Image (cartoon, rainbow, N blue to C red):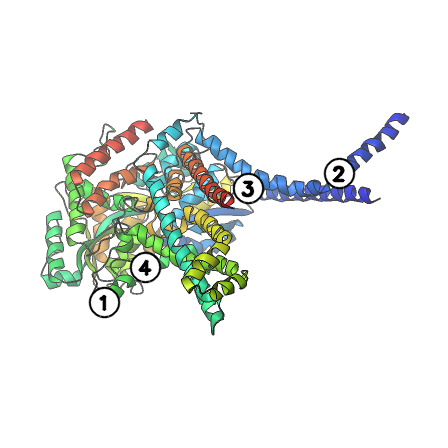
Amino acid sequence: MKRHSVVKVAAVAAATFLAAGALTSCSAGGGGDNGGDGGSKTLRVTLANHVWTDTIKSKLPEFEKETGIKVDVSQYGEDQLSDQYNVKLNAGTDEIDVMMYRPLQEGKLFAKNGYLTDLTDRVTSNSDWNWDDFQDGPVGATTFEDKVVGVPIITEQEVLYYRKDLLEKAGLEVPKTMDELEAAAKKIKETNPGIAGFVARTEKSAAVTQFSSFLYSFGGDFIGEDGKSTINTPEAKKAYAFYGKLIHDYGPANVSTDMSWPEAMAIFTQGKSAFYTEADSLYANATDPAKSKVSDTVGFAPIPAGPAGSKAYNVPSWALGVNDASNNKDAAWKFIEWATSPDMTLEIQKAGVPGARQSVWENPEGTATYPEDLAKAIAVSTKNGVGHDRPLVIKVPEAREIVGTPIVTAITGGDTDAAAAKADKAFQQLLDDEK
Amino acid sequence: MTAPVTARPTAWRSYSNWANRHRKWLFAAPAMIFTGLLIAVPLVWTIYLSLTDAEGSVRAPSDFVGLSNYLEVFSDFNRFWPAVGRTFIFTGGALAVELVLGMVIALLLWRPFRGERWVRVAILLPLVATPVAVGMMWRLIFDPNIGFANQLLGWFGIPDQPWLSGTDTALPTLIFVDIWQWTPMVVLILLAGLTSLSDEPDEAARIDGANSWQRFWYVTLPLLRSTVVVAIVLRGIDALKTFDILYATKGKGGGSFHEVETLNVYAYGLSFDYNDYGIASTVLILFFLLIIVLMWAVTYRRKANR
């Protein structure tokens, strides 16, 4: 009897095990099928931490009521978002329907890997929604091999943040050229102990985007027309040396080479620097009295002109795409259409997020909430702007580290020309490998 | 027709007998197989990836390239070997100080005293803090411009130090943070060992006239040997694999000059930043082998000494 009972128990245990397994797989399967019936169920949307996201989230109930689709939002910081995509999309997940992504950073890689659905037919299907209203630069960045794979939502231009009170005290005008910027930074640093003349990002990969406007204004670029690396040209070397010198000579006393925007912005908003070059989309950090000690004295100006004029970047920093493995593409498109409609874009722009639709910039309401000088600076950047702020390659993170190394070398007072020559070789190698 | 009827009970009985004799294995089998697969599948998959040129996406087509990834990694004196060096410096530095400091604190806490409970709780606090939060906290403290560490030095008239932002000071600063956080664990292990020791050998030595250093060095420490080895193995593996505080303080790539890039940080960058899954897997496999060899050496020595 005893041995029989052992076998019996084992059999029961095995049966339970199998049944439990079957049940779990059932429920997993059920989850995946949701929304296949025209979008009455849950739509999974993955978004980055951004003012844009906050506004959209506050309006979500309207969308849910209107369409009957339940929206499930997951929200991450930039790096965490990238890691999420890396893991989940690599595994071919269908658990993400709509994804907020960075067209210049990951767009090419995602499109090449087939993660992004071809939206070409959808964007042209609704004339009220008006795809033609989107600016050409951003649209170019969300198009891969003539297929539209994303809808740009946020644009960014680089501007000069400055302290009105410090300039006034030093008897200086707002710098219009790079030389004037250097002279002003020098004078303010010398006459105000403990206050830096200039601050900007210093971490090699984070600095690349904010350095790019200096590069363009000095007449350089990352990649030439022939597809070859151009970071070793005289123009590029001058730009590297200039950006580095501004921070090395006129920057904070103990300059760290780990600063991305939160750290650099903190130095500026703590009142420890006179000038700061940064993306305009972050301006609220400097004008919000809760976050900034200099909210009442901060001014904005276009990037000062270098030998090639004032050429800031003007880029789509974020876009919405649809995961190609999603079972919920119709609902996903409905969400994108709603989130990027002309009205919604205007609404979000009023909250301080530069949009990608031309109409919101032409509408006086669209810039009414901006500081006046910022709106003017942005207008200059959008007019002369360059449509990229980093090398447009597939392996963007690697490329950014390469072209960013001479920046850090310059900031720490090293041999910039040698660093540029070395980076040039490595960058050319990367470009050759990608062909 | 009768044959199967008689055959079935026989087969059933022999199976039942077999099952009964091996029931400890039979019952443990599902859990063992599951655990085994949980370890083996990722490992085999990583080994496979390390032999391919997978990049961009692991689902994208990739070619089998044999050992060429390993050759590439071994000849990489730019990132790989410095990362190996930093891994050893970090682990060695942190482990040595943690053992000495841990031993001192454990000996102090060994004998009962007033307020003992409060001191023990206070000492264990760093251990329960989340490493990422710890990283953020120290990053603020060690900020060269607005951090508290430099302010403190200023009160004593010592000039500002670069701390985490200096190329030469970043790694030692992080070793300090690791010591701050993980010494309590060493204390805990050593204290457990100490309390299990009997008092008699110590008393005998005292009667023979040994001073306190001699009693520690010739009596307590040898008795505590196996506990110390456990502490070395546990803390050593942990320190080798440190990722969170390095990433939280210096970000991707271990800083602009890779000044704190250990093997783990390097492998993370290769897979999550560069999407170079082939090379990343190679580095991880080598890292895995390194840990196995080191741990084997520690435990083997222990057996040989017995």
Q: Name the residue beneath numbered marker 2.
A: B19
Q: Name the residue beneath numbered marker 4.
A: B140
Q: Secondary structure at mark 4?
A: helix
Is A61 situated above or below B66? below
Q: Secondary structure at mark 1?
A: loop
Are labels 3 and 1 on one chain? Answer: no
**Residue B301 in sight from this viewpoint:** yes
Mark 2 surroundings: few (<14), some (14-19) or many (≥20) residues within 10 A: some
| Rendering coords of residue B274 (x, y %) | 36, 37
Mark drawn on residue B156: 1
| Rendering coords of residue B289 (x, y %) | 45, 37
Mark 1 surroundings: few (<14), some (14-19) or many (≥20) residues within 10 A: few
> Which marked residue is nearer to the observer: mark 3 or mark 4?
4
Mark 3 surroundings: few (<14), some (14-19) or many (≥20) residues within 10 A: few
Mark 3 residue type = Gly
Q: Name the residue beneath numbered marker 3.
A: A38
Q: Is residue B147 left or right of residue A72?
A: left
Are labels 2 and 1 on one chain? Answer: yes
At 27% across and 65% down in the image, what residue appears? Answer: B152
Q: Secondary structure at mark 2?
A: helix
Are labels 3 and 4 on one chain? Answer: no
> Which marked residue is nearer to the observer: mark 2 or mark 3?
2
Mark 2 residue type = Ala
Which quadrant of the structure image shows residue B153? bottom left
Q: CA distance from mark 2 to mark 1?
A: 76 Å
Q: Earlier in the sequence, mark 1 or mark 4?
A: 4
Q: Are marks 2 and 1 in contact (CB under 8 Å)?
A: no
Which quarter shows the N terminus of chain B?
top right
Q: CA distance from mark 2 to mark 3?
A: 53 Å
Mark 1 residue type = Phe
Mark 4 surroundings: few (<14), some (14-19) or many (≥20) residues within 10 A: some
Q: Is residue B26 left or right of residue A409?
A: right
